[in-house]
Image (cartoon, rainbow, N blue to C red):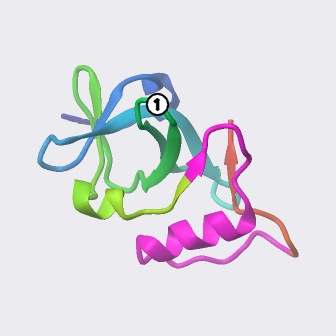
Amino acid sequence: MIPVENIADWRGQEVVDPNGEKLGKLDEVYYDGETDEPAFAAVKTGLVSKSLTLVPLLRASVGRDYVRVDRRKAVFKKAPSFDTDTELTLDDEAKTYEHYSLDYTPAGAGARRLAKR
């Protein structure tokens, strides 16, 4: 495995947990607006009613055809998920940070911290 250099190039690839269990496909990358660094992978899950679940990219690595994240499938499955056709809200963002026990401060008055590119 190698460290991730440009995670956006891995869209469409499988996302797996530290044990290699599949979480879903990498759909989008959310960047931290303050640091301009990739912060979360939006993983598309479900066969019929597709949804997105965010998972932190901290300590992520890539293999030949997958992205490995540093969160176990059991934790990922309990994370908040979002409809693929809606925009992430400030509340959704805060709940995601809280679920993964990450420090969270909004970008400003009513502004989200995360943004897709």
x, y percent for residue 15:
32, 37
x, y percent for residue 19:
11, 48
For the residue pair 26 and 1, the one nearer the viewer reads as 26
Give, as a three-letter code, the residue at label 1: Val
x, y percent for residue 28:
56, 36
Indicate whether 5 appears above or below 80.
above
Q: Specify the farthest residue to the front.
A: 48
- The residue that mark 1 highlights is 48
Indicate whether 43 appears above or below 79.
above
**Is the N terminus in the top left, top right, bottom left or bottom right quadrant?**
top left
- Helix, strand or loop at disc 1? loop
For the residue pair 57 and 13, the one nearer the viewer reads as 13
Instruction: Let me know if residue 102 is in the magenta part.
Output: yes
For the residue pair 40 and 53, the one nearer the viewer reads as 53
Residue found 70% across the figure and 48% down from its top? 115
- Residue 3 in sight here: no
The answer to whether 1 appears left or right of 104 in the picture is left
Residue found 72% across the figure and 44% down from its top? 86
x, y percent for residue 54:
49, 52
- How dense is the environment of label 1, judged by Cα within 10 Å: few (below 14), some, or many (20 and up)? few
Quadrant of the rendered image containing residue 65: top left
Which portion, as a residue range, is magenta?
A: 82-108
Q: Specify the farthest residue to the right.
A: 109
Residue found 51% across the figure and 36% down from its top? 49
Indicate whether 112 appears above or below 88.
below
- Residue 32 in sight here: yes
Instruction: Let me know if residue 5 is in the magenta part.
Output: no
**Is the C terminus in the top left, top right, bottom left or bottom right quadrant?**
top right
Quadrant of the rendered image containing residue 56: bottom left
The answer to whether 47 appears left or right of 88 in the picture is left
For the residue pair 63 and 95, the one nearer the viewer reads as 95
